């Protein structure tokens, strides 16, 4: 399955050629943001992937350190030691090291040179800024997503994707996303298919997740809102419907409160109005602190038991294989350190005041027996947001399966609600 890659950088458009590079037992697929060794996918941090991609694409010359710093980090200031650590990690994931330097060679005083023999499979060239007129579906009707990058005011790189054609629907980022890995995930694939019918779905990886910056300076609700602001500004969306799923609900509410003139309609799905540290019950607060400790201790382990625990909370009524799929998706999405930072930010979220001041048409959908975010949180939103409508969904799953009745009801309610919106505007051309 192909993906269109558009990269936006301040200072001018960047042309990206979709390529598949093969060297030794390694395949580096810049189209799919995927690295494989011996046919098996290898988890690679986005900055490390960028370093590898830039070096192999410019293997005919020595790449200066300043060029790598500008390409990977843009206007954000980082030290040379940070680049050195990414070079070390890049060597490690491709089976190289600083002594042998069989793949990446250090040219002292100059930079780095790619020295391994490479076989390539070229693809078409895409230029940033041309996505508004390009088709979003393959000729055979398959969905295709288009990837973009932008930078927040604090310099964090944010990856976002568009899929489908028509008026936009923006989905605020939530707990641990990865634009590429979730594309074929049985946990999320039906969400993208269902929500992009007749419209352009916009998704993004929040800071610390997926293809976005893995070393964010700030991980807070305010920073998450800035991620969303940057994405919609980069796309040129002036007024649009906004969806918040789970933790993304608080981000969506905070954004709508800050920019009421830009949100035409608001959809909250399994969302909470306040984080776990603000729970009134001491037992509930202790439960969330226990979950935080589990993330801190077990997230990065090869054994999936800790992540399976979280999977079962999100989807209690699914085949066990889906728990494994979700656990693996979470592992690939972020590091244990970032998972803790993001979880801490979620625990501290509180948008009760913002929700009470909203004046935006709002649809609230919540699983009646949600095992992750209690139905009472949906009731709280309905009581706070004037004129909102609460629709209970008959399921225990926080993340619904495509084959359960609640999923069909969810899509029907969303389609009907968004169909009432006549003021939505599509994207302008993406500018630098």
Image: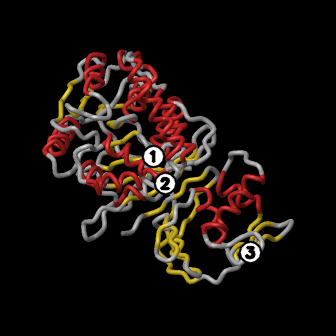
Instruction: In the rendered view, tell whether residue 35 sits above or below residue 272.
Output: below
Q: Which residue is mark 2?
A: 148
Residue picked out by circle 1: 235
The front one of 355 and 262 is 355
Question: Label 2 to label 3, Cα distance in Å?
Answer: 32 Å
- Residue 49 against residue 100 in the figure, above or below: above
- Identify whether 91 is placed above or below 195: below
Crowd rating for badge 3 (residues with CA inside 10 Å; few <14, some 14–19, many 20+) = some
Mark 3 falls on what kind of element?
loop
The answer to whether marks 3 and 1 mark residues whose Cβ atoms lie closer than 8 Å is: no
Who's the residue at 46% across and 66% down the image? 32
* Mark 2 neighbour class, 10 Å CA radius: few under 14, some 14 to 19, many 20 or more: many
Camera-near label (2 vs 1) is: 2
Q: Is residue 380 left or right of residue 224?
A: left
Q: Quadrant of residue 65?
A: bottom right
Compared to residue 413, the image places residue 330 above or below, namely: below
Reading the image, the residue beneath label 3 is 101
């Amino acid at each position: 399955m192909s993906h269109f890659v558009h990269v936006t950088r301040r200072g001018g458009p960047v042309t990206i050629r979709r390529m598949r590079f093969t060297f030794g037992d390694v395949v580096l697929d810049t189209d799919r943001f995927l690295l494989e060794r011996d046919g098996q996918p290898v988890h690679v941090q986005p900055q490390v992937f960028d370093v590898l991609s830039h070096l192999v694409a410019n293997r005919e010359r020595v790449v200066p350190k300043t060029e790598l710093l500008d390409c990977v980090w843009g206007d954000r200031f980082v030290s040379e030691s940070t680049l050195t650590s990414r070079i070390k990690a890049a060597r490690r994931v491709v089976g190289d090291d600083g002594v042998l330097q069989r793949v990446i060679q250090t040219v002292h005083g100059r930079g780095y040179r790619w020295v391994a023999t490479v076989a390539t499979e070229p693809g078409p060239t895409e230029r940033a800024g041309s996505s508004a007129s390009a088709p979003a579906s393959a000729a055979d009707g398959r969905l295709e997503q288009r990837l973009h990058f932008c930078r927040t005011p604090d310099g964090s790189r944010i990856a976002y994707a568009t899929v489908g054609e028509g008026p936009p629907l923006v989905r605020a980022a939530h707990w641990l996303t990865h634009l590429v890995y979730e594309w074929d995930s049985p946990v999320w694939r039906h969400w993208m298919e269902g929500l992009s019918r007749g419209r352009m779905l916009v998704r993004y990886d929040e800071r610390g997740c997926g293809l976005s910056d893995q070393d964010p300076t700030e991980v807070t609700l305010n920073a998450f809102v800035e991620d969303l602001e940057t994405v919609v500004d980069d796309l040129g969306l002036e007024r649009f419907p906004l969806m918040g799923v789970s933790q993304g609900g608080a981000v969506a509410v905070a954004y709508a409160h800050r920019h009421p003139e830009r949100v035409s309609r608001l959809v909250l799905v399994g969302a909470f109005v306040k984080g776990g540290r603000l729970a009134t019950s001491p037992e509930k607060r202790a439960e969330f602190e226990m979950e935080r400790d589990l993330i801190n201790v077990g997230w990065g382990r090869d054994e999936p038991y800790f992540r399976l625990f979280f999977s079962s909370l999100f989807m209690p009524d699914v085949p066990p294989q889906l728990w494994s799929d979700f656990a693996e998706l979470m592992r690939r999405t972020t590091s244990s350190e970032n998972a803790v930072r993001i979880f801490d930010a979620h625990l501290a979220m509180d948008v009760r005041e913002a929700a009470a001041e909203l004046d935006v048409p709002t649809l609230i959908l919540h699983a009646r027996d949600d095992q992750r975010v209690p139905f009472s949180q949906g009731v709280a939103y309905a009581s706070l947001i004037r004129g909102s409508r609460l629709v209970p969904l008959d399921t225990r799953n926080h993340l619904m399966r495509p084959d359960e009745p609640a999923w069909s009801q969810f899509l029907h309610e969303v389609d009907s609600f968004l169909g009432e919106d006549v003021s939505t505007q599509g994207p302008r051309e993406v500018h630098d």
